[in-house]
Amino acid sequence: MTSEPSTLDPRALRGTLGQFATGVTVVTAIGRDDLPRGITMSSFNAVSLSPPLVLFSIGRGVQSLDDFRQSPSYVVNVLDHLQYELATTFGKPSTDKWIGVKHRPGLNDVPILDGSLAHFECVPFATYNGGDHEIFVVEVVAHAARDGQEPLLFFNGRLRGLGEEYPATPDWHFAHYF
C-alpha cells in the first residue's frame, strides 16, 4: 500500500496530537553489546488481553532502534509522577543514561526501573511499518503495579502529574477492555 505525501503541517499535527494526554514510559531492552538501553516514550497502548499484547513505537531516527529490534525481551516501565528526571534522562540521546539509575534485572536481564508505577515484561510478537516509526507489538509475560501512586503524564508538549481527581468512572463500555 502506497500513500501520497501528506499536505498536513507536521508541527500543527504534533500540536493537535499533544491535546491527547498519555502516560509516560521508559521502555528498556538489552543492546547488541549486552548493555542496557532505555527510551522515554508515550506511544504505549494495550492491544489484546488474549493473547496479552501491548505496543510501543520507536522513531526510525533513534540511535538504539537496531538494539531494540534484536533484543530478546523488553520491559515497559510506567513512570510515577515523581520520576520526572528519569523521563528527561531517557528522553535524550546519551551513552551515560544509566549512571545512578536504580534498577533490577528482569527477564533476560532487561532492566526494571525502581520506583516505577507499573512494569510489563514482554517478548517480541510482531513489528510493523509505522511511517517514520517502527511499531513493536509485544507479548506480556509478567507484570506488576504499585497501588496508591500517581502517573507521570505527557500533555500539550509537557510532562505533568494529575491535577485533579474526579469521581469514579461509571461502567462505560470502554472500561470493559481494561
Image (tube, rainbow, N blue to C red):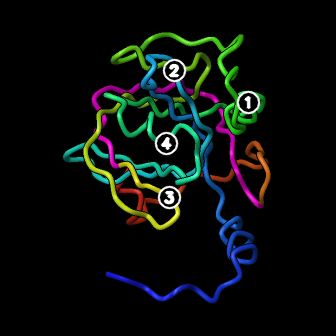
Q: CA distance from mark 4 to mark 3?
A: 10 Å
Give how far across and how far down residue 110 sits, in percent: 43, 20
- Give the residue pinned by disc 4: 65
Residue 154 belongs to magenta span = yes
Tell me the amino acid under the disc marked 2: Pro
Residue 49 image offset from top left, x and y in percent: 26, 47
Q: Secondary structure at mark 4?
A: helix
Q: Looking at the picture, how far across and down is residue 98, in whole percent?
A: 65, 17
Query: Residue furthest toward the left?
Result: 50
Residue 36 - label: 2
Asked if marks 4 and 3 touch (Cβ < 8 Å), the reply is no
Q: CA–CA distance between discs 1 and 2?
A: 14 Å
Is 98 located above or below residue 89 in the figure? above
Asked whether, in this view, residue 46 is left or right of residue 162, the answer is left
Disc 1 marks which residue?
89
Tag of residue 30: none
The numbered mark, 1 or 2, whose residue comes first in the sequence reads 2
Residue lying at 63% horizontally and 52% vertically, measured from the top left: 167
Looking at the rendered structure, which numbered label has been put on residue 133?
A: 3
Q: What amino acid type is highlighted by mark number 3?
A: His
* Membership of 91 in magenta stretch: no
Labelled pair 1, 2 in contact (Cβ < 8 Å)? no
Q: Nearer the viewer, residue 45 or 71?
A: 71
Residues at marks 4 and 2, CA–CA distance in whole angstroms: 13 Å
Which region shows up in magenta? 137-156
Sequence-wise first label, 4 or 2: 2
Q: CA distance from mark 1 to mark 3?
A: 21 Å
